[in-house]
Structure formats: structure tokens, C-alpha cells
Image (tube, grey):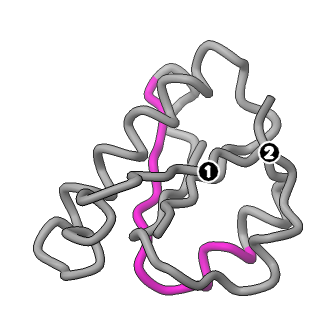
Amino acid sequence: MKMYILIRESVPPGLAIVAAAHGALAAYLKFKDFPEVARWLAGPFRKVACKVSDEEFERAKKFSDHVVLTESALDNQEVAVAFKPRAEWPEEFKSLRLYR
């Protein structure tokens, strides 16, 4: 089980760290009553943070079970999208760049 958090590559690193933290919490709060989240919390509690282009960001929002995060310091621009943890992910997610 893992949670994906996608962060726009245009977001400055300091705000990207905040977006990732907020994304994990927001996704947990939105989906906390789902059985997948209980399994995820039982371990090993994996999260994957990826840096994505604007096009990848928009495509990702078409997949179900996510929450979009905005940043007030960037005029409420959408900066990240976090997904409910799941065991299997579409191929599109497996080719995304890890945030390093």
C-alpha cells in the first residue's frame, strides 16, 4: 500500500515540502474511514512524492480518490494532489519522477 503525492515542478522547494506534508494529512483526513487507509496505516505506511509538469498534474486529477492542495502564498494556486493509498497503481504513476 502506498500514497502518491504529486507536486508541481514550478513550486519552490520550501513550499513543496509544506505541500507534501499537507497533502499526506489532507488525504488521510478525507479517506480515513476507508479500509484501504486502515491497511496502509498498519504498515509499512509508504508515501511517494513526485515532481510533475503541469500536464502530468492535470492528467493525474482525472484519477479517482484524490484531494487537491492550494497554496495561499502563491495566490491559491493548485500545487499538489494527494491520492488515497492503494495497493495497485495505474502505469502512469509508475513513470513519474520522484521528488529529490
Q: How many numbered badges does the structure rendering display?
A: 2
Query: Which x, y percent locates residue 42?
Result: 24, 59
Q: Residue at x 62, y 13 (%)?
A: 14
Q: Residue at x 81, y 66 (%)?
A: 56
| Three-letter amino acid code at the position of disc 1 | Val
The residue carrying mark 2 is 98
Q: Residue at x 22, y 64 (%)?
A: 30
Query: Dot 2, how many residues are within 10 Å of its Cα: few (below 14), some (14-19), or many (20+)?
Result: some
Callouts 1 and 2 close, C-beta under 8 Å: yes
Q: Is residue 34 left or right of residue 87?
A: left
Q: Quadrant of residue 15?
A: top right
| Three-letter amino acid code at the position of disc 2 | Leu
The residue carrying mark 1 is 48
Q: Does the magenta-highlighted stretch encompass residue 60?
A: yes
Q: Which is nearer the eye, 17 or 48?
A: 48
Q: Does the magenta-highlighted stretch encompass residue 55?
A: no
Query: Which x, y percent locates residue 74?
Result: 58, 26
CA–CA distance in space, label 1 to label 2: 7 Å
Q: Quadrant of residue 35?
A: bottom left
Q: Is residue 23 left or right of residue 7?
A: left
Q: Is residue 36 left or right of residue 23?
A: left
Above-or-below relation of 83 to 6: below
Q: Which is nearer the eye, 56 or 41?
A: 41
Q: Residue at x 80, y 70 (%)?
A: 94
Q: Reading the chain from its start, which is encountered first: label 1 or label 2?
A: 1
Q: Is residue 38 left or right of residue 68?
A: left
